[in-house]
Amino acid sequence: MEQLWQKISALPIFSAELKTGSALTATPESIEFVSRLLGRKPGDMRFYTTALTHRSAVHDPSTPLNTHSNQRLEFLGDAILGLVITDYLFRELPDSPEGELSNTRAKIVNRKSLAGFARSIKIGDHLILGESADHAKIRVSESTLADALEAFIGAIWLDRGISAATSFINEHVIEHRRFNTLITAENNHKSRLIEHTQALHLPPPRYSVISEEGAEHEKRFTVEVSCNGKVLGRGIAARKKDAEQHAAAEAMLNPESIS
């Protein structure tokens, strides 16, 4: 993938516009901030300056012409983050069905979660804002912080390539304590299903093994979950407990059908 990236970045239509970077001058504080996160000095600081530039700064009379906001870099970073998180979940949750993986990924890359990751690196303190903007409000805005984090990832990709962008995501998103909390909470589907049935004043869900296949060291359990005699979902996994979780996850994909 590195070779593919080198070929793409060499295309004139791709590099000519992006390498103009930002017309704003990076401050020593912002250079130190970026260097600390990268673990080395940036190759082209202009990418990161753009990543830190809020759209309010672009329309400010005091801002130099040809200043770009971080919105395009946010678009790029969003795709990169989604790819890395998808790859991680696919490898780490081999028994999870597609719908479950999609729901887990959505929990990780939503605005609230990304803002939490962004706060941990204090990216809000280094945003470039317009003079007339409400600085106190914008610097803590979930949307602003999430956008800045994605833009920063896009800047790393352009400056250092996919390996550096992936390393950053691993260190500041995947290895963050909040990440495991999100995965655990999202994947405890049995608890969610019980809470849902209790809220509807229904009896607790019942799990039944309907088939058990394979040799002892490669078992595959198929489990159905039902409530009030109605089958709500089915799950298949190497462990019965995991199959139950998958069955509950399938049931919660269509909660309005539970009655």
Image (spheres, helix red, strand yellow):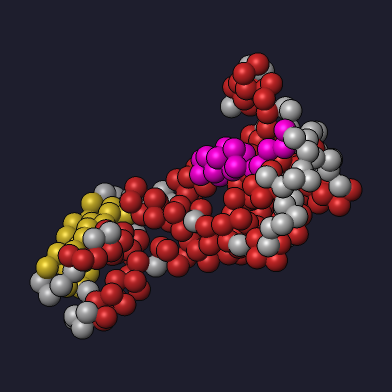
Locate residue 76, reporting x and y percent.
57, 37
Q: Main secondary structure of the magenta part?
A: helix
Residue name at image x 47 percent, y 49 percent: 89
Residue nearest the observer in this picture, 19 or 156 = 19
Residue name at image x 59 percent, y 50 percent: 147
Locate residue 80, reporting x and y percent.
56, 39
Which image quarter: residue 2? Answer: top right
Q: Is residue 189 left or right of residue 32?
A: left
Task: Give the residue at the far left of this rendering.
Answer: 229
Count the marks. 0
Residue nearest the observer in this picture, 47 or 180 = 47
Q: Is residue 186 left or right of residue 111?
A: left
Quadrant location, the N terminus: top right
Locate residue 246, reporting x and y percent.
31, 59
Residue name at image x 33 percent, y 63 percent: 245
Which image quarter: residue 45? Answer: top right
Judge whether 50 appears above or below 30 on screen.
Answer: above
Magenta stretch holds residue 76: yes
The reply to whether residue 216 is visible in this rendering is no
Task: Give the residue at the far front of this rendering.
Answer: 61
Magenta stretch holds residue 183: no
Quadrant location, the C terminus: bottom left
Residue name at image x 65 percent, y 60 percent: 138
Residue nearest the observer in this picture, 127 or 223 = 127
The reply to whether residue 20 is visible in this rendering is yes
Locate residue 191, reporting x and y percent.
35, 73
Magenta-tinted stretch: 66-84
